Structures are given as structure tokens and as C-alpha cells.
Image: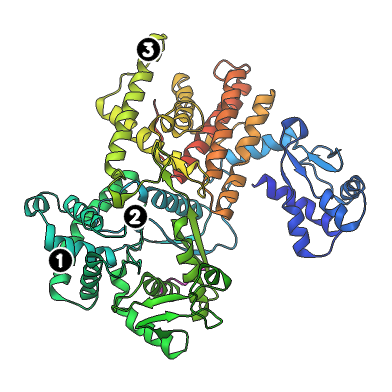
């Protein structure tokens, strides 16, 4: 039951009576939104103003005509026209109560599976396996995981593919570093850490300190050129370089999997790295040349833009779909060639409706280029989306930079968050004991589990609560705050709901199998009932725009609304018993929706805090 969609379907015939174009009707339906203030109603139809411009009539007159065309409905009170032509709608309390009682008996909490479902491939995380995961890998990993959980919950088929960087230029850097600078004892003790040191050390020797390993500049840089030569040897099947590559991989993959498990990332369906696609690349380049899609230029193989130009200036790059380089002068294939092979493989083997790439916004030009070349190649039926995101900033508001050694390793970041989570829990416990609260004795294992859930949840929620297109500053203090829009506050709200049932020695099962009637006797009850019923609406909004922060916004509104209900509406002491049961049902539904939404974000709840 999606309250907003129900209204849109109700209003559709009224709009169709005034305009005939389907596209215009859909655009006007998009103007129906949640009312900004409760006294204005629950939802607001804002179609009269744009319709007035279109039809050349006063907006209030248009609003009155819309009301005349609205079909009868028992779900709403009589609509009201406000201001120049806004139509305010308020659901009847009886409808909210009856609908919410039905939701309580539904395992999916009122969320119907989408029809028709779609088939997605989601590409996220995609670390370079040659070095430890650092904070820069965090956003792609947890954003992709949250989108996967959300789309699957809605009923879509989602295939996850971790496109590992196990074959690119960074391996040329590692191989060169290993051959010239390895510390054998350090490598034996901790291969991943020594490989990370070698990577940073070799890049520090480059004359041009850029961020792009594929950068063609600096051709007179002997270290950079030597690393490219090692990459070309690897791609050509050099036995020594292949042996080193095979030696590096297992240690790196285990390190990555360990971090994924601790973060609670869903297992990937596939982890096909760049090396998997390498055998396909020569044939793809030859096919592109044979079809006239690519041409040789100064020893490289390039795809010119549609006008046949190879741009030389930034202005020319923006003029048409950008060109691309498939094979460099030294014979090494580029990321573009690998990514084109990946698109072909995914389309042929997974047959998706859409492929989503959850990748840093700084890669926008690469994906613009990739999608343009894929379309020229003939892959026009599958949707290709770059789900871009901003940068995690340090306290100095500068991006973390792994290549300068400045990015904290993800494992260290998690450990610190868990330590602070435990400190925060113990501090809160002592304060509550001093205030006279009765608290249960918890084992060290239980406290450790709470600290793990709180610490990791704080990291993930702090990221997911941002609009993914924005940068944000990484701050433990803000992440672990017990008030405001944080995971800790949401986890505490859930635990508080659960404590009510423990305190009253009430079993929640009967509120789910035979839910009692909801009674709405106070404005806080109505506000909570309405917010609970907006759960499907929040999921649809987050999925349609691939924006998980819509879910955290919903959680924040739900938690605040529940706090108001908790303050004004006694639960266990409510009289008569029917009102007590009604309020207990609201508490149980709040807990279930809090838990389900946090689970969709990949965040654990705890029963006690």
C-alpha cells in the first residue's frame, strides 16, 4: 500500500479530463507531494498552477474543476483548496487505522513486489586487489550493497559483480616495485602490507604525481615507463610476471573478503576481475577495426568521435560523444577495452535490463566515454547508468589520497569505530545507572556485539545519510552521536521499542498474527500511523533515483514521530485494554519498520542498548 501512488491513481482520471497527453498527465502527477505542514493535510495536489499556464485560465478555477472530476472516495476527507489553487488532502483516521492493522499482519509490511520486475547487474566496490582496502573504497561498497538490498526487497532480480582490479597498470607498478625494492622479511610476514608499501613507494618516484595510472603524460619518466613495460609483459604472458601476479592474488583476495564479512556486505554473485576479460580484448580490438569503429593512430588503436575527429583540446572533447583509446602504443589494453568486454559479457550471459556502475564521480568522463562506445558498438537496448558519488573528506576537508599514503586503511577505521562504539555504550550505561534506571547485566560477548553493531552501523549510516552526489567530512564524533540523524539514534529507537515489550512482559507474536484494531485518539497516534504507512513510498523514491539517503530521511522522520508518540501517549499504562493493545501494535510496527529499513541499509540492530 503506497499512499502517494494511491492518490496519484485517484487523481489521474481528473487530470485526463483536462488534458489528453499521457506525458503531460504523468508530469502533473509528479506534482502531488507530501504536505509541508500537518495542518495543511497529508498530501497536496499542486497541478493547478502548471495547468493554468497550459490552459490559460486562473489556477483556482482549474483546482475547482479538478475537484469536480475527482471520483468518489471514502479514504479521504473532503479535499480543500488553499491559496492560489493548492488542493489539500487528508486521509480519514478510519482508513489509516484499517490499513495499518492489515499491514501488521503482512510480513512485507505493506510493500507489494514491483510489477513488472526488472533485471539489474550492479557493479560496485571493485577494488584494486594489490593493496589493502582504504576509506576511499567505503562509499562504492556500502552504496552498492544498500541498492542491492533495496532492489531485491522490491522484487527485482539483482546480479552483483565485483569487477576486481587485478590486471591493470597498478600491477606493473607492483611488479616493478617487487623486483627492485621488496623487503623479503616484511613480505613474508604481511604480503598485503608490503605490497601496499611498494605501490606507494614506486609512485612517489614518478616525476609527475598524478592520480591516474593510465595517464599518458610523463613519457620521459623512466620509472613510469618501466612500470608500463612490466604491465605490457604481464599482458603478453611473461612467465615471471605471471608467476608474481598469481603469487600476489590469494593474499589480497582474502584480505578483501575479511573486510566485506565484517562490514556485513552481501556475498557477491560474481567477482570477475580484469584478468578474466583479458583474453577477449585482442578479438574485440580487431572487430572494432574491421567494422570501421576504431582506427590506428600513432601506434595506438582509438575510437574517434562520430564526426571522425580525434579531439586535441578540452573544448573538442565536449563537442560530441567522446572518443576512446582501446590499445596504447606499448601494446597494453586500456580500461575502456576491458569495460567494453565486460558489457558484452554481462549482456550475453546475464541479459539485464540495466547495468549500474557505483563508482566515484571523478570517473564521469570514463563512463561517458564507455557508454558512448558501447552504443556505437550496438549495445543500445540495455540501460547503462553511472551511479556516481562524492568524495569522503578528512577533517582538513581534503580528499583522502591513498597514493600519498594518507588514506586510513578500512580495517583500522572499523576497529577505531568499534572501540568508540563500546566507549559510547559504557558511558551511556553508567549515566543511566546514575539516574536510577534498572538495566540488565550483559555479558562481555553481548557488549562486544553491541559495540560492533554500533561502530560499524555508525560508519555506514553516516555515509548513506548523505546525498550520494555530495562530499562529506568523516567524523567519528558525529557518526556516533546518540541524538540526531545517526545510526546510533535509530538503533536506540529500535531497542527502546523492544524494551517496552520486555517491561510489560508482552509477547509480540499476537500483534502480527491477529493484530488488534488501531485506535487513533491523539494527534501523535495519527502522526505515527501516517508515517508508518509511508514506508513503501520511501522505498520507491529511493529505488527510482538510486538514492539511499531517502531511506535515512524516512528513518529520521519515523524516529522523531515515534519520540513524540512515546512522550504524549502512555503505552503500558493506557486504559482501556483495547487502547493499550492499539498502542502496543504501533510500537511493534515501529520496531519492525525501523529494523527492516536499517537492514536494507546493511545496518544491524540490537535488542538492548
- Residue 96 visible here: yes
From the viewer's perspective, tell me whether residue 493 is left or right of residue 137: right
Residue 133 colored in magenta in the image: no
Residue 350 colored in magenta in the image: yes
Which quadrant does the C terminus fall into?
A: top left
Residue 559, above or below 107: above
Which secondary structure, mark 3? helix
Residue 293, above or below 441: below
Residue 449 sits in which quadrant?
top left
Question: In the rendered image, which residue does mark 1 sit on?
Answer: 244
Residue 285, above or below 545: below
> Looking at the image, which residue sits at the far front?
220
Front residue of this view, candidates 569 and 98: 569
Q: Position of residue 41 (x, y in %)?
A: 76, 35
Q: Position of residue 61 (x, y in %)?
A: 92, 47
User: Which of the two labelled residues, at mark 1 and mark 2, occupies the earlier sequence position?
Assistant: 1
Question: In the rendered image, which residue does mark 2 sit on?
Answer: 267
Q: Going 34% across and 55% down the picture, which residue do you hit?
A: 267
Work out how far the residue at label 3 is from the one at label 2, CA to CA, in angstroms. Answer: 41 Å
Q: Going 35% across and 15% down the picture, which residue do you hit?
A: 430
Q: Position of residue 250 (x, y in %)?
A: 19, 59
Which secondary structure, mark 2? loop
Question: In the rendered image, which residue does mark 3 sit on?
Answer: 433
Q: What segment is highlighted magenta in the picture?
A: 349-353
Which secondary structure, mark 1? helix
Amino acid at each position: 500500500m503506497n499512499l502517494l501512488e494511491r492518490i496519484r491513481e485517484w487523481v489521474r482520471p481528473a487530470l485526463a479530463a483536462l488534458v489528453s497527453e499521457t506525458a503531460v498527465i504523468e508530469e502533473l502527477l509528479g506534482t502531488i507531494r507530501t504536505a509541508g505542514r500537518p495542518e495543511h493535510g497529508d498530501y497536496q495536489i499542486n497541478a493547478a498552477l502548471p495547468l493554468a499556464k497550459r490552459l490559460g485560465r486562473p489556477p483556482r478555477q482549474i483546482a475547482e474543476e479538478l475537484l469536480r472530476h475527482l471520483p468518489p472516495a471514502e479514504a479521504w476527507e473532503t479535499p480543500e483548496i488553499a491559496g492560489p489553487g493548492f488542493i489539500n488532502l487528508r486521509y480519514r483516521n478510519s482508513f489509516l487505522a484499517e490499513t495499518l492493522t492489515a499491514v501488521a499482519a503482512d510480513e512485507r509490511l505493506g510493500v507489494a513486489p514491483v510489477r513488472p520486475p526488472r533485471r539489474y547487474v550492479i557493479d560496485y566496490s571493485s577494488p584494486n586487489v594489490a593493496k589493502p582496502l582504504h576509506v576511499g573504497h567505503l562509499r562504492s561498497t556500502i552504496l552498492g550493497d544498500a541498492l542491492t538490498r533495496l532492489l531485491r526487497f522490491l522484487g527485482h532480480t539483482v546480479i552483483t559483480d565485483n569487477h576486481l582490479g587485478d590486471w591493470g597498470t597498478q600491477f606493473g607498478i607492483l611488479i616493478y616495485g617487487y623486483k627492485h625494492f621488496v623487503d623479503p622479511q616484511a613480505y613474508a610476514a604481511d604480503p598485503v602490507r608490503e605490497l601496499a608499501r611498494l605501490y606507494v613507494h614506486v609512485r612517489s618516484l614518478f616525476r609527475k604525481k598524478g592520480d591516474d595510472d593510465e595517464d599518458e603524460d610523463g613519457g620521459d619518466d623512466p620509472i613510469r615507463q618501466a612500470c608500463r613495460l612490466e604491465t605490457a609483459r604481464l599482458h603478453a604472458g611473461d612467465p615471471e610476471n605471471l608467476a608474481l601476479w598469481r603469487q600476489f592474488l590469494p593474499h589480497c583476495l582474502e584480505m578483501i573478503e575479511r573486510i566485506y564479512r565484517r562490514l556485513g556486505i552481501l556475498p557477491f554473485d560474481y567477482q570477475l576481475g580484469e584478468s578474466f576479460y583479458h583474453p577477449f580484448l585482442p578479438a574485440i580490438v580487431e572487430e572494432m577495426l574491421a567494422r570501421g569503429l576504431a582506427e590506428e593512430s600513432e601506434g595506438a588503436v582509438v575510437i574517434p568521435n562520430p564526426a571522425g575527429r580525434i579531439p586535441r583540446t578540452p573544448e573538442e572533447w565536449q563537442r560530441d560523444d567522446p572518443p576512446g583509446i582501446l590499445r596504447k602504443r606499448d601494446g597494453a589494453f586500456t580500461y575502456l577495452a576491458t569495460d567494453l568486454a565486460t558489457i558484452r559479457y554481462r549482456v550475453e550471459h546475464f541479459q539485464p535490463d540495466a547495468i549500474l556502475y557505483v563508482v566515484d564521480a571523478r570517473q564521469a568522463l570514463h563512463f561517458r566515454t564507455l557508454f558512448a562506445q558501447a552504443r556505437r558498438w550496438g549495445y543500445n537496448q540495455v540501460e547503462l547508468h553511472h551511479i556516481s558519488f562524492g568524495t569522503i573528506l578528512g577533517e582538513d576537508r581534503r580528499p583522502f589520497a591513498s597514493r600519498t599514503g594518507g588514506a586510513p586503511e578500512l580495517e583500522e577505521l572499523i576497529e577505531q569505530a568499534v572501540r568508540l562504539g563500546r566507549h559510547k555504550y559504557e558511558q551511556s550505561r553508567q549515566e543511566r545507572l546514575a539516574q536510577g534506571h534498572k538495566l540488565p547485566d550483559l555479558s562481555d560477548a553481548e557488549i562486544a556485539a553491541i559495540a560492533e553493531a554500533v561502530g560499524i552501523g555508525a560508519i555506514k549510516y553516516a555515509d548513506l545519510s548523505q546525498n550520494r552526489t555530495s562530499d562529506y567530512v568523516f567524523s567519528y564524533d558525529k557518526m556516533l552521536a546518540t541524538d540526531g540523524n545517526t545510526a546510533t539514534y535509530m538503533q536506540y529507537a529500535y531497542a527502546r521499542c523492544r524494551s517496552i515489550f520486555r517491561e510489560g512482559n508482552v509477547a509480540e507474536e499476537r500483534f502480527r498474527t491477529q493484530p488488534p484494531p488501531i485506535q487513533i485518539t491523539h494527534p501523535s497516534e495519527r502522526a505515527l500511523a501516517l508515517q508508518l504507512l509511508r514506508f513503501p513510498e520511501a522505498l520507491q523514491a529511493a529505488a527510482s533515483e538510486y538514492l539511499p539517503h531517502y531511506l535515512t530521511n524516512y528513518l529520521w522522520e519515523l524516529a522523531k514521530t515515534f519520540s513524540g508518540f512515546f512522550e504524549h501517549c502512555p503505552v503500558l499504562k493506557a486504559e482501556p485494554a483495547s487502547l493499550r493493545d492499539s498502542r502496543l501494535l504501533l510500537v511493534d510496527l515501529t520496531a519492525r519498520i525501523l529494523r527492516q529499513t536499517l537492514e536494507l541499509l546493511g545496518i544491524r540492530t540490537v535488542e538492548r542498548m
